[in-house]
Amino acid sequence: MLFLRRTLPLILAFVLGIIGIAIYYIPHNAAQDLENELAKWDRIVAAFAMLLGLYSLMRLHWSRVRRQQAGWGYSSLVFLGFAIMFFLSLFNNGLGPFVAKSSADTDPFVWMYNNVQVPADGTMFSILAFFIASAAYRTFRARTPEAAILLVSAMIVMIGRVPIGALISDWIPWAAQWLMAVPNLAAKRGILLGVSLGAVATSLRIIFGIERAYLGGGES
Amino acid sequence: MKDFLLNIDRRIIFVFVALGVIIPSLTEFPLPIKPTSTVQSIYDTIEEIAAKNGTVLISFDYGPGSMPEVQPMALSVLRHCFNKKVKVVGMCLWPTGVGLAQLAFDTVSKEFGAQYGTDYVFLGFKPGYTTLILNMGRNFHDAFAQDLQGNRTTELAVTRNIKGLKDFDYVLCLAAGNTPDGAWIPFGQERYKFKFGLGCTAVMAPDQFPYLQSGQMNGLMGGLAGAAEYEVLIKTPGTATEGMRPQSIVHLIIILFIILGNVMYFLHGRQKGGA
């Protein structure tokens, strides 16, 4: 069992990791065909991972409903929503599940998407504007010189990215663009390089079996 | 009064924000929307492609939550393409983008009388993300053997001659997540060297500037303002142009509250140890 739980995954991670890196840099047709094939496998795994995600979501909400935890009624709506959309997806506007997906306006699945999911999701996102306004007033204080610089920069970008900035003065949009294209770019590039080097280091640790947290069991 | 201004109830702020959205939405006042160079670049690229009767790939990588910001970009770019007879291939790396992409294609194709199969094709969603892009780069027809309606891509006029990603004259990603910098640039543009542009939510835009400067991305539409700039370029004002009025006023309201908060903090809050 130890071989299946630990040794085999470590061997697979090492072999496929090394092959994955090598073939990315080898322009030979055989290497490119192998990469194409491995990419297809990855897509099949990704499709099954979506099923795993669905199972995990259902399990979480089922446990909330079963234990009648606070807000369990909302969890039951997850099952209701899933059941309705799953049924409508199979129904496929009367065509059934074995033909191409209908995109007709009359399809109840399309109707539910356009009239339930789109407005509900849009509403959730738009509520952010209210909370951001309140949070900005409460927390955006120039307590230190660094915070003051950040505050002034943020205000210039906020006003410079909307047309009213140009109405006030032409230099506001120019200053906003400069802040984005020079100091912002420099900071973002620094962060990006750091994160990328970290990702390379973590990948190498996984390939060489140093990092084993992904195997589970809390060991690393 | 001091304490009131130092700790304004959040419901009062909510009322100001609500009024800042509702009143400008119901009234009309002109605002100068000037296209920035990064948006102009996307427009110019599509103009160049129109001159050679080329094909654009648009990846709809967003969902209903970001629809108000990104969908106006999709509509404007499609209007530009169909008006100039540029062929369009649509696809999604996010499953939630399928319905919105379909809606955009249905709306704009009716406006311009664009025909499915000869003017545009919609491939739908496939899982895989980075590896899907690798497969598309190597063998497009293998990665997408069929479109969303079940037609073979080898038989459709728009996709018949597309062998890989290099054969697209332009790839435009409309995104609300990490598909541009996490997938399209490292596994697509860097690998297969096609021209790449991006339309994204405002919150994502600052992260994209390194790719603009490096040339891995030739244009950027950021948030509703970017969409409004594109609407100005194609001379078809839509929801993004209308949205500039409430957005401008709400930005002003937020800035005024920040200034008020800081003034009160320096006048009174600091002595008390901060608000």
Image (tube, rainbow, N blue to C red):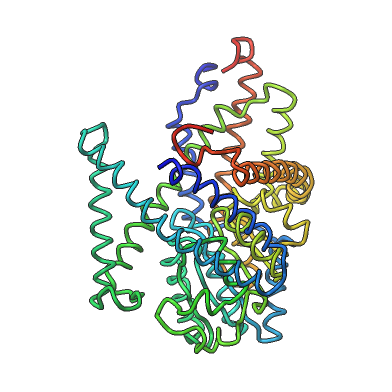
Query: x and y percent of residue B18 in the render?
Result: 45, 43
Q: Is residue A20 left or right of residue A217?
A: right
Name the foreground residue: B9 vs A177: A177
Query: x and y percent of residue B169 in the render?
Result: 67, 77
Residue at (75, 48) in percent of width and height:
A169
Residue at (61, 21) in percent of width and height:
B264
Residue at (62, 68) in percent of width and height:
B172
Q: Is residue A136 left or right of residue A44?
A: right
Name the foreground residue: B104 vs B19: B104
Residue at (56, 65) in percent of width and height:
B73
Query: x and y percent of residue B230 in the render?
Result: 63, 66
Q: Is residue A208 left or right of residue B157?
A: right
Q: Is residue A70 above or below residue A35?
A: above
Query: x and y percent of residue B242 in the render?
Result: 53, 60
Res B232 quadrant in image: bottom right
Q: How many discs mark residues in the rendered view?
A: 0
Q: Residue furthest top?
A: B272
Res A34 quadrant in image: bottom right
Q: Is residue A57 above or below residue A16?
A: above
Name the foreground residue: B214 vs A219: A219
Q: Where the C terminus of chain B falls, by quadrant?
A: top right
Res B37 quadrant in image: bottom right
Q: Is residue B189 above or below residue B54?
A: above
